[in-house]
Image (cartoon, rainbow, N blue to C red):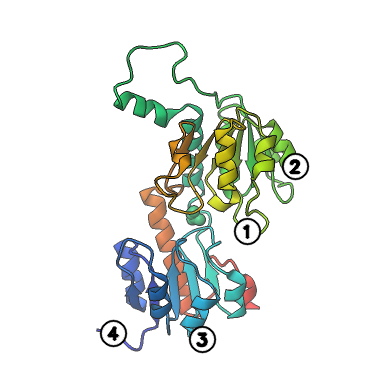
Amino acid sequence: MRDATLPTVLVTRRVPQPVLDRIAAVADMRLWEEDRPIPREVLLDWVRGCAGLYSLLTDRVDEEVLRAAGPSLKVVSNMAVGYDNIDVPACTAHGVPVGNTPGVLTETTADLTLALLLATARRIVEAAEFVKAGRWVTWRPMELTGQDVHGSTVGIIGMGRIGKAVARRLRGFDCQIIYTDTQPDPEAGALGAGYVELDSLLKASDFVLVHCPLNEQTRGLIGARELALMKPTAVLINTARGPIVDQEALLDALQRGVIGGAGLDVTDPEPIPPDHPLLKLDNVVVLPHIGSASVATRTRMAHMAADNLIAGLRGERLPHCVNPEVYG
Ligand code: GLV
């Protein structure tokens, strides 16, 4: 039974039940039950008159959505640390605070980055498939040989929370760590990481790791020119956002041997079409955007997004707000 005294919220995907229960206790919840992104026309219809929108990174939240929601909208809460799917200036212009889930997924995403780095460098996926295909005939001196991560030079693009967590792990591998960002980070020195310009980082690194957010400055940051600066053996790892790398330029660079390999947890678009030529290359490992995908972390993210949503419904300041300027 609908309780007309409660604010209406739209939750665009099933999240763990305890999180849904918390939301249902304070709101009249419209839940998109299907395990695929809510179709645009349904989003625009169901958001009408809502006070809260609990979104995923697969939902585009823009002016059209804000207009469809109307003046009742008090909060947009994205269950992700990244918020490139949200037109934040438009939300601010409508007086709507936007919440995200920083911090909680840092270590889990750093773990995955190391897993992908090692998998790509040491050809783990290819080797496992080799065994399953019955091709393991004998031990051969140079079979499936990859590249050492220990002792290598690793370049980190974006020394934020995740970049630093990765740098901390790489110290255990005796890597030389260099990084670039919009400006030097005062904490990076303590991690043994030296600041360089992007071009120098690309030229010097054995492994280039992308950890910056996607925005208008970083869209297409790694294109044909940047790939050409990298060593022919270098490996590019992206666990941030697909459009930071020009995927067609990357494909071309891999096919022509301009760089040595790539490990991608994010693609452009997502999902990558299963017949995409990148998936045919042995020196490429592609994962389905699982950086934060541990049970504990995804559960905590879902709760954190509920915290933001509920605070917004109550007219309180969001615990994690990406546009604090909305509060004047
Ligand atoms: C995942 O990519 C996130 O931004 O949380």
Whether residue 73 sits left or right of residue 230 in the image: it is left
Q: Of helix, strand and loop, which one carries label 3?
A: loop
**Looking at the image, is 207 positioned above or below residue 198?**
above
Please name the amino acid that badge 4 sits on.
Answer: Arg
Q: Residues within 10 Å of mark 4 (few under 14, many from 20)?
A: few
SS type, badge 2: loop
Say whether marks 4 and 2 touch (CB < 8 Å): no
Label 3 to label 1: alpha-carbon separation = 27 Å
Mark 4 to mark 1: distance in Å? 40 Å
Q: Amino acid at mark 1?
A: Asn
- Secondary structure at badge 4 equals loop
- Identity of the residue furthest to the bottom in this view: 4
Residue at the left extreme, as displayed? 1
- For marks 4 and 2, the one nearer the N-term is 4
Spatial distance from mark 4 to mark 3, Cα to Cα?
21 Å
Q: Where does the image place residue 80, in percent across and percent down from the top left?
A: 48, 59
For mark 3, what is the residue?
71
Q: Crowding at label 1, few (<14), some or many (≥20) Cα neighbours within 10 Å?
A: few
4 or 1: tag closer to the N-terminus? 4
Q: Which residue is mark 4?
A: 2
**Helix, strand or loop at mark 1:** loop
Count of labels shown? 4
Task: Give the residue number, with chain letter if any, for mark 2.
Answer: 197
Query: Residue tagged by mark 1?
Result: 215
- The first of marks 3 and 1 along the sequence is 3
Residue 168 at x, y = what percent? 58, 37
**Which one is nearer the viewer's eye here, 229 or 304?**
229
Name above or below for residue 12 compared with residue 162: below
